[in-house]
Image (cartoon, rainbow, N blue to C red):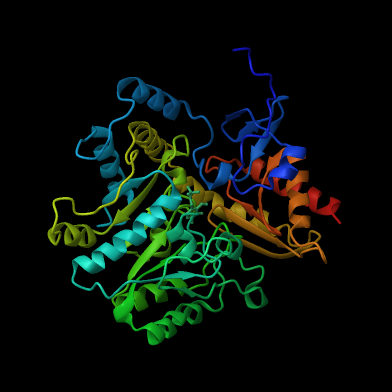
Amino acid sequence: MPDTPRPNSLDAFWMPFTPNRAFKADPRMVVRAEGMHYYTPDGRAILDGTSGLWCVAAGHCRPRIVEAISKAAGELDYATNFNLGSPSAFEFANRLGEILPQNLDRIFFTNSGSEAADTALKIALAYQKARGKPGKYRLIGRERGYHGTNFGGISVGGIVRNRMTYGPMVVGVDHLPHTHDIARNAFSRGQPEHGGEDFANALERLVQLHDSSTIAAVIVEPVAGSTGVIIPPKGYLQRLRELCTKHDILLIFDEVITGFGRLGAPFAADFFGVKPDLLTMAKAITNAAVPMGAVACSREIYDTILANSETPIELFHGYTTSGHPLACAAGLATLDIYRDEKLFERAAELAPYWEDAMHSLRDAPHVIDIRNLGLIGGIELEPRAGAPMQRGLEVFRKCFDAGVLIRVTGDILAFSPPLIIEKAQIDLIVNTVRGALKQVA
Ligand SMILES: Cc1ncc(COP(=O)(O)O)c(C=O)c1O
């Protein structure tokens, strides 16, 4: 076989969530990464303002993780966890249990956040059946919610473009209203003041409509990321927890982006002081070096399903690569880095500086809102008349050309840098975005 010429053809790879035609006409490639940076084929460094896709929390190509993966690959490349065990999966589940909220330490491994969301929904339904309440089948999501792209996730999710092509969805789903309220909460520093209790009280109305005897679970992202960084107003998650408990409904936190220090605490559940019954994770669980997701369940859920099973296998669910040895090795090394470098604490320490830096863009052109929490930032731009999303995309391209990777959702710029970021790099992100905003019409 002759060597494939580089760059090779871009035709065959159907790129996910990408305008394929536009990208392939004007591609942006990276070939290497280290620490806070990606590198382009011509050697240009690009500062990573988004941790890849909210996932490389410890920075890129960390030698400890690389070594752990290669060692595992040479020792036990693969073993099924169906009826056969491999030690690293047990060890990793135990280690996760040590940093998860108390009692939320029964772990089901998946390969992605989407699978984690669908797994959590299935476990919620299985639990209701196991405790003798099979009538509790409804799942409640939220407008603008994102729980990945599988059918359960898009059913409870609330991003219209992700849903409209694929109906009908999973039946028996309803949605809470989203909590984005620019009219009252624009330019909030940290959690917005207004609307928390009211938005959560919408669950009471859904209970009145459907009756709690039909509702299995509510799933929300504690901080909504993919829809453009929506920070929960004060009191919202606490009230949601109260109502779920009152009506005997499970609360699922999708912590795929908030898990592992993003808010300056191990999980958003810790940060907000609100404990869900199930919690999904992915992305930073392995620093994204090997794909993995997981669902943490309360002992009550796990014990109930096991105790009431009529069949030897208690949950008919799993993936060929659930608890894959390479993913577990990467995850264990990642947890070591988080602990030894105190990265969650570091995120908490940097958060005030990050907040000031983000809000310093308030007077930049086109900015109609700025939002922040932990090491998350969102900057909402006024959409260009007659061409929504164009302005955001142009800012994204200009930042990339200037050496900074940001993320854009419509006309909202999203930021989630690795937790190892330095203050000077925060300044560079902000200055680059300011420059880009000045350049776009
Ligand atoms: C909150 C949330 N849940 C689920 C997912 C899906 O994860 P994955 O892309 O690994 O399937 C994402 C991805 O961004 C997410 O942000």
**Could you tell me residue 353's position as x and y percent?**
61, 52
Q: Which residue appears at 56% of the width and 78% of the height?
A: 194
Give the side of residue 33 with respect to residue 64, left or right: right
Residue 266 seen anywhere in this rendered image of the structure: no
Q: Which residue appears at 43% of the width and 85% of the height?
A: 205
Q: Quadrant of the N terminus?
A: top right
Most foreground residue, 43 or 372 = 43
Q: How many marks do you count on the picture?
A: 0
Q: Quadrant of the C terminus?
A: bottom right
Q: Quadrant of residue 245?
A: bottom left
* 235 versus 287 height, above or below: below
Q: Which residue appears at 51% of the width and 68% of the height?
A: 232
- Going by the picture, which residue comes out furthest to the bottom? 208
* 141 versus 405 height, above or below: below
Q: Which residue appears at 71% of the width and 36% of the height?
A: 28
**Could you tell me residue 304's position as x and y percent?**
18, 62
**Could you tell me residue 249's position as x and y percent?**
32, 73
Give the side of residue 58 with respect to residue 96, left or right: right
* 271 versus 111 height, above or below: below
Most foreground residue, 385 or 174 = 174
Give the side of residue 185 with respect to residue 207, left or right: right
